[in-house]
Image (cartoon, helix red, strand yellow):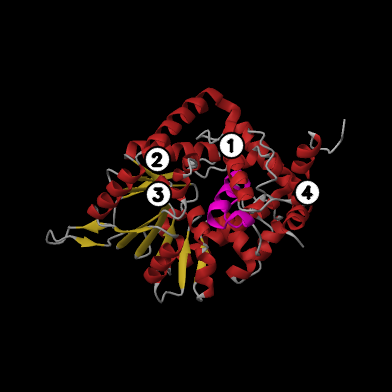
Amino acid sequence: MGLYEETRERLERGMKDGRTETLKVIASVVLSRLRADEGKLRRMKERYRKIKEGAVGRLEELVGLAKDSLRAVGCEVFEARKGEEAVEYLLKQIGEERMVVKSKSNTLKELELVEKLERRGVEVVETDLGDRIIQLAGEEPLHPVGPAVHLTLEEVARALSREVGRELPADVEKIIKASRERLRERILGARIGLTGANAIAAEEGAVGLVENEGNISLITRLPEKHLAVAGIEKIVPTMEEAVTVMKTCETFLTVVGAYHSFIKGPSRTADVMGIEQLGMHGAKEVHVVLLDGWRREAVRMGLEEVLYCCNCGACLSVCPVLLETAHAFSSKVGAGPIGVVRTWFVLGPEEAIRAGLFACTGCGACREICPGSIDFPKIIERLRGKTCARGLVLPPHTSIAENIRSTGNPFGEKE
């Protein structure tokens, strides 16, 4: 089967996926929340866009400043030009550990770190409840707001029953209680916590994190070692600007964040004889991995807007292709327009085609709702052109181009 046939079959299967109805329900809820105060959102978008434009425009300067500031507060810092370098560093830090606890992170997904750790016999415990349910059920996440909302209560109970070692009833409160107890056992037994970062303040050397469950607070403090992985686009000049970024992400994700936190190095105390010791109630070691991967390449290509993304997922709630085809418009790197773009950079043009590079309608709904006003249709159009220039032209497109050349119209109809 050729690439075109494979992609078409994938999209057709997606259109028959019953989960699209659940996606539309989630999208409706998200949009109703976002449209409740459009004036406030407009002002927030303007501030956010200005911050990201300024930060990406000073990218090299801010990367250098962040590295110096993070080291000054006691963090170990590693800048990875390629994903492989980041993975190698993380594997070295994990060493002989057989279990790590992890929070939700698109950057870790980009690195395929979970799969690589599991191949080495390391158990990776997702600590976000939705992600943990998906992990135990062997399913794919449906939406950032609710990864497991497409599963029935009975399916969730079955998946978690195996984990807690007893049969759980199809009761929400009992499922939550059992999950909380079991996850805390796993977190208390872990020596390493893995997270991403919502923002990094370059001047202060602070890693900013947003959460609603409280799991990130636990896995960044209870294990001895905290490994934070962030793309270099997460760096902004100051903590004030980082707060705006974090607040914007929370608002457009439409999940009320119970915790906004900044981590400035390992925990420490000097309460005994005035001698400073690391690792009191928080991590003894904090490692920050700053990943380039494809980000500088995007800037060189004039596609720096891609780096304005805060991973809020708002674009997924308005994308007509995603809402009609579910996971067909995605890859293991991500879903929707931002997922397709990242797939092009991380996995290459062929995988981007499979993920839906040529399925985008160019409607612009994603651009309108995006807090960074990222022009995804324009970016995808540019990537389509570069894909075709590499010889990856789909047969129907070749036929249409030939029709235009020979008859002056795409249908091949002669006047």
Q: CA distance from mark 1 to mark 4?
A: 25 Å
From the top left corner, tell me how far across and down residue 4 is, in percent: 74, 54
Magenta part of the chain:
331-351
Mark 1 and mark 2 lie on one chain; the one further toward the N terminus is: 2
Q: Say which residue appears at 25% left-offset and 55% top-offset.
A: 71
Pick the residue in front: 268 or 55: 55
SS assignment at label 4: helix
- Which mark sits nearer the N-terminus, 4 or 2? 4
Q: Which mark is nearer the camera, 4 or 2? A: 2
Q: Which residue is mark 1?
A: 378
- Measure the C-alpha gap from mark 1 to mark 2: 19 Å
- In this orientation, does residue 244 appear? yes
> What is the spatial separation of the Cα atoms under label 2 and label 3, in whole angstroms?
9 Å
Q: Position of residue 409 (x, y in %)?
A: 79, 34
- Image coordinates of residue 5 in percent, x first then y, are 77, 56
Kind of residue indicated by mark 4: Met
Looking at the image, tell me whether mark 4 or mark 3 is earlier in sequence order.
4
Question: Looking at numbered disc 1 in the image, what kind of residue is underneath it?
Answer: Lys
Task: Quote the CA–CA distance across marks 4 and 3.
Answer: 36 Å
Magenta span contains residue 340: yes
Q: Nearest to the eye among marks 1 and 4: give it.
A: 1
Report, in whole angstroms, how far the alpha carbon at label 4 lies from the one at label 2: 38 Å
Q: Which residue is mark 3?
A: 232
Tag shown at residue 15: 4
Q: Which mark is residue 56?
A: 2
